[in-house]
Amino acid sequence: MKKHNFSAGPAILPASVLEEAAQAVRDFNGIGLSILEISHRSPSFSAVLEEADELVRELLGLSDDYGLAWLTGGASTQFFMAPMNLLDDDKMAAYADTGSWSAKAIKEARNFGAVEVVASSKPQNYAYIPKQYEIPAHAQYLHLTSNNTIFGTQYHSWPETNVPFVADMSSDMFSRPVDVNRFGLIYAGAQKNLGPAGVTLVIVRKDMLGRVSRKLPSMLDYRIHLENGSTYNTPPVFPIYVSMLTMRWIKANGGLQGMARHNEAKAKALYDEIDANPMFRGVAAKEDRSLMNATFVMAEGKEEMAPAFLQATKDAGCVDVKGHRSVGGFRASIYNAMAPESIGVLVSVMQDFAQKNG
Amino acid sequence: MKKHNFSAGPAILPASVLEEAAQAVRDFNGIGLSILEISHRSPSFSAVLEEADELVRELLGLSDDYGLAWLTGGASTQFFMAPMNLLDDDKMAAYADTGSWSAKAIKEARNFGAVEVVASSKPQNYAYIPKQYEIPAHAQYLHLTSNNTIFGTQYHSWPETNVPFVADMSSDMFSRPVDVNRFGLIYAGAQKNLGPAGVTLVIVRKDMLGRVSRKLPSMLDYRIHLENGSTYNTPPVFPIYVSMLTMRWIKANGGLQGMARHNEAKAKALYDEIDANPMFRGVAAKEDRSLMNATFVMAEGKEEMAPAFLQATKDAGCVDVKGHRSVGGFRASIYNAMAPESIGVLVSVMQDFAQKNG
């Protein structure tokens, strides 16, 4: 049976990317060796890395003011590495608390300077994105989590401020156009829209760097990775390769504009059903709904039917529709690589379920 | 033409492992999804991680005094993470300097406490492993690089001391039996004998932890990774999977005893030729020669023939026999997965070259 992969991450990748990646594990570009067993300084991999860098620059329209690096350790490493590189002990950074990942970023930043939580939707279990809050002008940066995978919320506009943003875009990177010039630093664990687990893309405005007085271990210093083009040490070769293939696919499918159109249509199909179907209700504030992760629960009075609905999704080949324990209910993660047909299957399951049980 | 992969790393992996890994990129264990797109908390991947942990414990005979974790960032990250976790500001650690990687480890450790370089072969361009040096009893640990990839040297016995070792085993992990009980911490970037680039195995004696007063970011605290079984955050799923497959292959081929026999025979065949062939000479002290990386140069007076010999290796399908720029000449990396037949091909090229040019 065809599987429809609604996993929150590591998440669905394009079928053509998986096919090409499998071939490269056997024999990379006909060189007689696997991509897993070649030097990161070989001409074959250097070409991959160069193309990956170019695709990031092209997709985002990055100016030379920005550098980029392919690192490891996920967003969780960036939670401390960002303040370590950008926030001196006697300075302050502003943080918006919009979910569990924001909260972790806040916790890790407190080791490196003053942290001011300027907005939080925690009291409402993170069901919305706070707006209209004050951001002190002396903040070194404002940290945002652009999409909140667990709670199903996403920024659809950015705060008005001259303070540069530092953003965790792990779960909506390359899913829509972004005005990069508002951002001092963007980081994204690859394992949603970008590639497999094991690589983290970091994009940084160069003038943000070199302002802290603390000593940085070489591997934690963004400048060293930028200077060395992601090869200060052995980078995660295969995860970078698969990310490069995925960006090629994004480019071939209309770039970030194309992804946005496609993602908006998919999300609309799903949210329309959530709103129309009497068996379900959405969790997040409508204006802040995520185009990547749709969270929903059984309608009031129907709660005991949740296990039966989850089983029905499984019976139809839908994988990982169970919600995160912090929210309960259901979560359908519908990243770039998910086809509209898979949304159609889930919508049909919802409709059938209502018909049989309504 | 069949390729013989003498790359220093990322390096050769067993053909059967590559085949199974390629299949898993298409469809993992028949679940209808790629290993690249499933949750790190899915039952399918949890089983991989569990088996990987068990194989490490079984191959090394690890007692419960030791914990292990699959991390990222390579040995270069361990260069600072080890002292950050084990060495308090007012304490001292001893370091043996046996090559470029040792020197980097020393440099990074100096940020965290006193570092005493108790031995160094640097004045002889690292051509041997220092022996018979004093290790102060109050050292928190003695840091060793068990195999020096660039210079072709390897420890064949360990220093006599009660100070626990902290060892970078990136390039000879699982190539031979090791008395783990001498070690407080072992770390190894996977991309030589263990798997592809993108994962680092860390093995630590639990009583080494919790002795430093500094605050550790969560992702840099070994205790957090041990407590969370390598899933505090999303681990590098595919590199761990391929490492697990490689360990299965090691186990099926006689475990570490089997690897040692096989590696000794391969190294002997190559070093015998280096010593017998008048066109070449070995670089490293004979008693310290690495079973993983054989370094050799043209014999005196034959230096100008180096490019022709390198071309001859390429013509025979031998990949990456060029030496590292710090040593020059040639380096044949002959890790676990290299078949004796490939050594035979290189030896034949050396013999033919001597016959034609001698």
Image (cartoon, coloured by chain):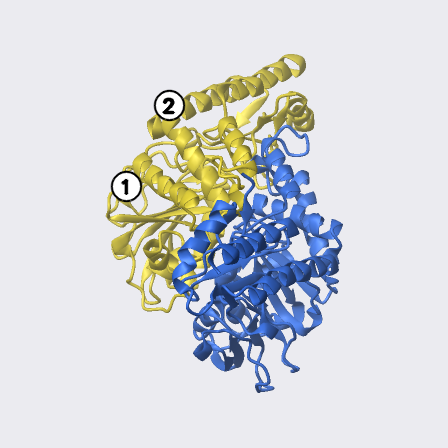
Chain colours: A blue, B yellow
| Mark 2 surroundings within 10 Å by alpha-carbon count, few (fewer than 14), some (14 through 19), many (20 or more) | few
Q: Give the label, 1 or 2, closer to the camera.
A: 1
Residue A150 position in % (x across, y down) = 49, 64
Q: Please identify the quadrant where the C terminus of chain B is shown.
A: top right
- Which amino acid, mark 2? Arg
| Residue sitting at x 46%, y 35% | B193
The residue labelled by disc 1 is B62
Relative height, residue B76 to residue A257 (above, below): above
Relative height, residue A62 to residue A124 (above, below): above
- Which amino acid, mark 1? Leu
Dot label at residue B261:
2
| Mark 1 surroundings within 10 Å by alpha-carbon count, few (fewer than 14), some (14 through 19), many (20 or more) | some
In this image, A98 relative to A266: left or right? Answer: left
- Determine which quarter of the picture holds residue A193: bottom right
Q: Which is more toward the observer, A88 or B228? A: B228
- Determine which quarter of the picture holds residue A228: bottom right
| Residue sitting at x 50%, y 31% | B20
- Callout 1: residue from which chain? B
| Residue sitting at x 49%, y 51% | A313
In primary-sequence order, the first of circles 1 and 2 is: 1
Assign a secondary structure to mark 2.
Answer: helix
- Callout 2: residue from which chain? B
| Residue sitting at x 72%, y 67% | A65
Assign a secondary structure to mark 1.
Answer: loop
User: Are labels 1 and 2 assigned to the same chain?
Assistant: yes
Q: Which is more toward the observer, B350 or B204? A: B204
Asked whether residue B39 appears in the rendered view, the answer is: no
